[in-house]
């Protein structure tokens, strides 16, 4: 009973620790899957920006970059789509991407078709971040890194792409349409500026709160390239006044896409490294818990056998010592004293005679 009373609470504590550890390991695995999915999406958002520009220039064929990016996301979705619950959303997005080369009509109609697809791609980022629990991560460095790579950077590149294409469209549009396109252009220009500031803030917060020795150094050069691309786009936008420079914007867009690819790759690699470290720690704690429980069981078993052995020794020792057995014999022989020793009263016989008289 004592063994059970000690072992049951120990087993209950072990199971609780193991359950919490398993939950954390499952969440970490899901986040690692999310990072893998986001890595594939990062190439798609840049490819769709290229597709939009080429379609507005009259190129009907789908760019090779889009074909490669779609194939890459499709492969990841086939493996991870069930766990991340992305299959339905990705199938819809993939179908709309396949229809883009078939879109005809005015430049505005072609542009709107690409805007719809780009917005759905940005929603895919949000979906993966939520379903992989990256968006709910408790560690500040991982949370700020995922915010930068799933929200701020894709929005920046999408806004620059739209800003560049709206500037080209406005240059050849009639007066009434040109005014509308200019307003939309200005809105996208403001979005670009806000996005790059938020990217910088998020990455700075991640650096300030991380224990990683490589995060700061890896981000600096790539973030500078990203910011230079944004600055080039702002110069082409001519936000201080005057008409935007479409050729400058096109160059800035290409530079920015390259910078985004490098920066998002670094950020995702850093997130993956932090998650790998977390998984290693959880695995160590799991092994440690098993080891401590095993030690507890062994100690309890050893203590049980030791106490049982001591109990047998005590019983054997008591059996060899004079005790209740000798006292019983003396009592039983008390009635025979009168026949053996004549001068000792027969108390036993007296009791019997008294009983007879009664």
Image (spheres, helix red, strand yellow):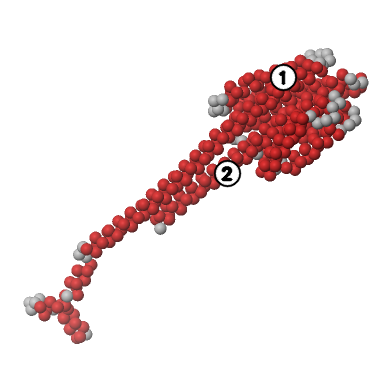
Circle on res. 23: 2
Where residue 288 appears, as percent x and y from the top left, is 47, 42
Residue farthest along the bottom direction in this orientation: 357
Q: Which residue is drawn at 54% across and 46% down?
A: 19
Q: Is residue 72 left or right of residue 301?
A: right
Give the secondary structure at mark 1: helix
Q: In this view, does 94 lie to the left or right of 343?
A: right
Residue farthest along the left direction in this orientation: 343
Where residue 79 appears, as percent x and y from the top left, is 67, 42
Q: Is residue 70 left or right of residue 301?
A: right
Q: Residue at x 20, y 85 (%)?
A: 356
Front residue of 110 and 62: 62
Viewer-side label of 1, 2: 1
Front residue of 335 and 141: 141
Where residue 172 appears, as percent x and y from the top left, is 89, 20
- The C terminus lies in quadrant: bottom left
Quarter residue 146 falls in: top right
Circle on res. 195: none
Q: Is residue 145 visible?
A: no
Quarter residue 68 falls in: top right
Give the secondary structure at mark 2: helix
Which residue has dot 1 on it? 229
Q: Would you place residue 273 above or below residue 131 in this image?
A: above
């Amino acid at each position: 009973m004592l063994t059970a009373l000690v072992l049951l609470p120990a087993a209950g504590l072990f199971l609780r620790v193991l359950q919490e550890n398993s939950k954390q390991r499952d969440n970490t695995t899901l986040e690692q899957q999310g990072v893998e999915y986001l890595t594939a999406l990062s190439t798609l958002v840049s490819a769709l920006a290229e597709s939009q520009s080429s379609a507005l220039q009259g190129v009907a064929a789908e760019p090779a970059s889009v074909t490669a990016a779609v194939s890459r996301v499709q492969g990841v979705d086939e493996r991870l789509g069930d766990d991340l619950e992305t299959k339905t959303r990705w199938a819809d997005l993939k179908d709309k991407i396949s229809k883009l080369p078939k879109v005809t009509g005015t430049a505005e109609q072609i542009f709107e078709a690409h805007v719809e697809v780009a917005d759905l791609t940005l929603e895919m980022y949000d979906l993966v971040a939520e379903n992989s629990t990256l968006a709910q991560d408790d560690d500040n460095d991982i949370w700020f890194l995922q915010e930068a790579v799933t929200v701020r950077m894709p929005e920046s590149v999408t806004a620059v792409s739209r800003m560049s294409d709206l500037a080209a469209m406005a240059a050849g549009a009639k007066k009434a349409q040109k005014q509308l396109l200019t307003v939309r252009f200005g809105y996208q220009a403001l979005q670009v500026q806000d996005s790059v500031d938020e990217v910088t803030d998020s990455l700075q917060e991640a650096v300030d709160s991380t224990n990683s020795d490589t995060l700061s150094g890896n981000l600096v050069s790539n973030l500078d390239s990203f910011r230079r691309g944004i600055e080039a786009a702002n110069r082409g936008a001519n936000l201080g006044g005057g008409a935007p420079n479409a050729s400058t914007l096109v160059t800035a867009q290409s530079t920015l896409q390259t910078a985004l690819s490098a920066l998002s790759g670094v950020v995702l690699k850093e997130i993956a490294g932090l998650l790998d470290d977390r998984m290693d720690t959880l695995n160590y704690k799991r092994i440690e818990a098993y080891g401590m429980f095993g030690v507890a069981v062994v100690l309890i078993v050893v203590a049980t056998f030791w106490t049982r052995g001591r109990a047998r020794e005590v019983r054997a020792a008591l059996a060899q010592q004079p005790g209740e057995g000798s006292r019983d014999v003396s009592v039983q022989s008390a009635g025979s004293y009168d026949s053996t020793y004549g001068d000792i009263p027969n108390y036993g016989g007296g009791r019997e005679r008294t009983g007879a008289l009664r």
